[in-house]
Amino acid sequence: MTRALEGNGVHFVRERGVATAIQKALERTYQLDRVADVDAFVQPALDGEREALLVRESDDGTVEVELRLPLLGERELDVTGDQGLDPLCQIIEGVSHFVYLTDRAEGGRVATQLEMELQAEVDKYVILAGAIHASPGALHPRSSERLRRRLYETVSFQHPEGTELGDRYRIANHLAARFVRSLEQRYLASGQFVEMRGELRRFYRMGQEEKIRVGRAA
């Protein structure tokens, strides 16, 4: 999986390859039909800019989408030992937003910003845990716990607490951490990977209120 995440080439070809691999992994995990190819919509982020999914509806009702992603550089992506996962996590977030938004739009459903952020926080774990599981060490409760702590505890936020964006990201982070921890306790500890995937698929198809309820109850 680590190799699959690497893509190939330079000048943003690698990032497109990573985005495509992440889209395929999310679709496989959640059993989703392809709505649109993410690589047709990605562009490099500007200097100092973080990932962003830009959506604009024109006067004729046409929806225009652009996904800006950061550069990964040329270093190897090692999800089990690399401490600098931020660019990769940004790409996972961006692709998660794209897949979630297009899937909801195809089904005629509305997706809120908090709903998308919460799902993206869970999707970061899904993708990176999948990469660890495919590695020689395999995913087990201790490696999952280390990943969970890296994703949800040893983090900093761009926006201050008390602001709309700051609170949204903190809520999404907190609820995702609780949900992932419950997956570890209920399924991962006993090796019930099929049941764990089923729970992830059920969560994916929930709306915002149900996602929040499940996260708080976890």
Image (cartoon, helix red, strand yellow):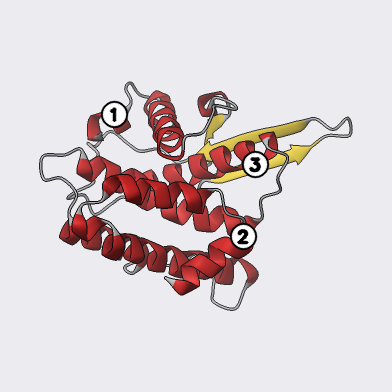
Q: Residue at x 58, y 62 (%)?
A: 210
> Which numbered disc, 3 or 1, marks the residue that appears first in the sequence?
1
**Which element carries disc 3, helix, strand or loop?**
helix
Check disc 3 and give the amino acid type.
Arg
> Which numbered disc, 2 or 1, marks the residue that appears first in the sequence?
1
Q: Does the CB distance between marks 3 and 1 fall below 8 Å?
A: no
Residue most extreme to the bottom: 162
Instruction: Please say whether residue 153 is visible from this viewpoint.
Output: yes
Which of 48 and 15 lies nearest the eye of the viewer? 15
In the rendered image, residue 17, in percent from the top left (x then y), is placed at 39, 26
Check disc 1 and give the amino acid type.
Ala
Check disc 2 and give the amino acid type.
Gln
Q: How many marks?
A: 3
Residue 208's disc number: 2
In the rendered image, residue 98, in percent from the top left (x then y), is placed at 57, 39
Q: CA distance from mark 2 to mark 1?
A: 31 Å
**Which element carries disc 2, helix, strand or loop?**
helix
Look at mark 1 in the image and give the residue it sits on.
4
Instruction: Please say whether residue 47 is visible from this viewpoint.
Output: no
Q: Residue at x 22, y 61 (%)?
A: 146
